[in-house]
Amino acid sequence: MALKDGLLAEFDHETATTRRLLARVPDDRLAWKPHDKSMTLGALATHLGELPRWADAILNQPHVDLASTSIVRDALGSCAELLAAFDAQVAATRAMLDRTDAELSAYWSLRRGDQEIFTMPRASAFRTFVLYHLVHHRGQLSVYLRLNGIPVPSIYGPSADEG
C-alpha cells in the first residue's frame, strides 16, 4: 500500500468526524469560553476548521518558519461559515495528498527563526500537524459542547448522547 493511501484513509475518517462535531457549533454561543485563558468557542471551532491548511505548507514547502508565519485567524461568524471553510480546506488538502511515496518521505522542517524545532518526513509532519492536531482540538471542542448542553456526536464509538 502506498503512503498516500493510508494518509487518505486516516484523513477521510478524521475529517468526517471533525465535520460532525463542527456542525454542532451553535451560532449564539460563539463568544462563550470556559475560562479566561481559553479560546472562545468560535475561535476554537475556527482553528479546528482551518487545520487542514497546514497541508499546503507541509506538502509544498521545504519548511515553515513560525517567526514569520501568522497562524491566528479571526473567528468565523456562524456554523455555516465554519462548515463551508472546513469543506473547502478538506477538498483542497485531499487533492494535495496525491503524492508519491518519495514525496511523502522527503523531509520537512519546522523552524522559529534560526532555531530548527524538528525535521521529519512529510507524511509524519502531516499526521502530526493536521491529523493529531485535529484530534487534540476536537477533544477540546467536545468538552465545550458538553459544557453548553449540546449533544456530542459519536467520535470513535458511542458518546453519552449518541449510541
Image (tube, rainbow, N blue to C red):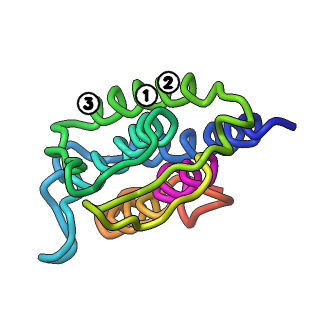
Which residue occupies 58% across, 52% down? 127
Circle 1/circle 2 CB separation < 8 Å? yes
Frontmost of labels 3 and 2 is 2
Q: Quadrant of residue 27?
A: top left
Which residue occupies 54% across, 41% down? 15
The magenta segment: 123-133
Q: Main secondary structure of the magenta part?
A: helix
The circle drawn on residue 91 is 2
- Which residue, given by chain and number where applicable, does mark 1 sit on? 87
- Which residue, given by chain and number where applicable, does mark 3 sit on? 81
CA–CA distance between discs 1 and 2?
6 Å
User: Does residue 105 appear to the left or right of 70 in the view shown?
Assistant: right
The earlier-in-sequence mark between 3 and 2 is: 3
Amino acid type of the residue that numbered disc 3 sits on in the rendered structure: Glu
58 or 62, which lies in front?
Answer: 62
Q: Quadrant of residue 76?
A: top left
